[in-house]
Amino acid sequence: MSKRITRPLIYIILIAFSLFYLMPVYVLIVTSLKPFDQVSLATMWELPKTLDFSSYATAFSKLAPNIMNSFYLVIPATLLSALLGSLNGYVLSKWKFKGSELVFTAILFGMFIPYQSILIPLILTLRNMGLYNSILGLIFTHVIYGLPITTLMFRNFYASIPDSMIESAKIDGANFIKIYGKIMVPLSISGFVVVAIWQFTNIWNEFLFAVSLTQSDQQPVMVALQNLAGSQVVEWNVQMAGALLAALPTLLVYILLGKFFVRGLLAGSVKG
Amino acid sequence: MSKLSTDRLWSLAFILPSILLVGIFIYGFISWTGYVSLSNWHSLIPDYSFSGLSNYAQLFKDFRFQADIRNTLFFTILFIAAVAFIGQLLAVLIDQHIRAESLFRNIFLFPMALSFVVTGVVWQWLLNPSTGVNLLLEKFGISPMWYVSTNVLAGFPVGKIEFGVPVALIAVIIAAVWQMTGFSLAMYLAGLRGIPEELKEAARMDGASEATIYFKIIMPQLRAITMSVIIIMAHISLKIFDLIYAMTGPGANFVTDVPALYMFEKTFRANDYAGGAAISILLLVSVAIFIIPYLLMNRRED
């Protein structure tokens, strides 16, 4: 294989795949900028004749309350699950006890289960607690079922902090909480960023809990987006504008902090 | 010595709530669901009277569930194969010290930040049979019906269903692959970066061609990653729900139905809680078959 042939070939393949990956983005943007009467089956690939932002206005007025719901859900759920995950990770890496490896593996399994298998008891329990159909209930749910992944990420992260640092802090008289606050937390700021971004993205995008545990005015944005298609005539331009609005927060996070997002993605594959 | 044990108590006090929560909300609830799946609870009013395995027996005789098994099987195989192959191909190409490396990487990775619901909505429009990609494909004389097709490729009857690859399912697989390739790309790239440059350099000095280097040095090093990609993708595809809910629903003749969706509709639309619970337990078992050995293997290496 000579370099002269392979180089252009590499670029041709990569560009071809890039076009395929960007195709939905193109169609989404083009469609969302057309007025409804120009959204026809035949002209789907054509650029809009004039820029028309009315579908964004329509989509925004329909989705705005649900976008707010998503923020009320995602921010506390992310912070809480990062905090709990870091405490668990701290104990499971630096304060191992008899059976702690087994406990860790048992917690990890919770990351992979299909949530359908806990959904019926969950709904009954949330009803009993008065948390069914409330954002609070969703926060509670995401914090609990986020425990495995956040614990995993922090445990792997803390495993790289040398035990000798903990030992010498102990000799200096630092206790469990002081070591956490003075050593572990300052050394794991980037760990917190990775976990927060991962949880933010996942909870924002989550659908099963959202659609099963909430109704109408409590629904997060993904359920509302799905409901936009429910009317008789699907206004594709509004659908596309809505899809973009709903995706914007996580897309922005990816664009601004993509490196941390990818680290979270790799950490999710268990090996640390 | 007493100080150490106070710290020990603190550490246990901090982890105990999480252990209890996981114990109750994961293992307790799974057992509870298992119990429901053995009951006669077929309406809005709970009925925990024991019915043995009748709900499971019912499922395997059910046309819709048989279709689900077929769909899940082909979805999983095709989805994993495509994600692993395309991800590795793109990773190897991107790793060739090319220009605009991070631009290409980001183009393939950004769908990972999207929701399956967004993907479903957009691809429903793209693969709309009377529009979309078909307008391009018609120029080549092909016009698949995509997700409204009820055709089953290479079908032959098994049980109540026609066993084969439903055409409509391919549309969903394309959307899922579009979204998830970024994951395997990132995994393979991390793997490739972990292969020491000296290893490849030494082979080049010995006169090995790039192809030989790929097959003899790189491929074996990536085997563990391929394993992880397959397992992670398998559990995602077995559980797939949002994408299908948003893009096609169960489809005519259930050509795009999957167990996760059937569970949802059986439980919350038809109020057949016992039947829904039985589906979810089968789903859990299918995921556990892949995940438990993987977890144990991973943990043993630690």
Image (cartoon, grey):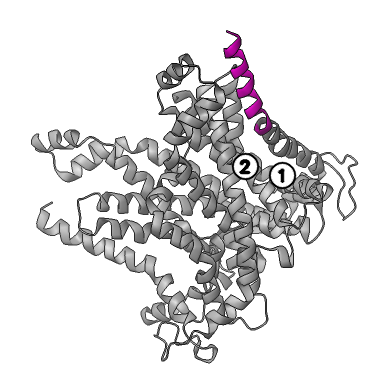
Identify whether B266 is placed above or below B191.
below
In the image, what residue occupies the spot 45% across and 24% down?
Answer: B302
Q: Kindly tell me whether residue A66 is visible in this rendering.
A: yes
Chain under callout 1: A
Rendered image quadrant of residue A48 = bottom left
Q: Where is residue B157 in the image (x, y as percent from the top left)?
A: 62, 58
Residue occupied by mark 1: A118
Q: Which of B54 and A144 is in front in this view?
A: A144
Residue A113 circle label: 2
**Label 1 neighbourhood size at 10 Å, few (<14), some (14-19), many (20+)?**
many
Q: Is residue B7 covered in magenta? A: yes
* Marks 2 and 1, the one that precedes in the sequence: 2
Asked whether the beta carbons under mark 2 and mark 1 sit within 8 Å of each other, the answer is yes
Q: Give the residues drawn in magenta, as a range.
A: B1-18
Identify whether B141 is placed above or below A265.
below
In the image, what residue occupies the spot 20% across and 58% down?
Answer: B99
Residue B48 circle label: none
Q: What residue type is labelled 2?
A: Ile
Q: Where is residue B159 in the image (x, y as percent from the top left)?
A: 68, 53
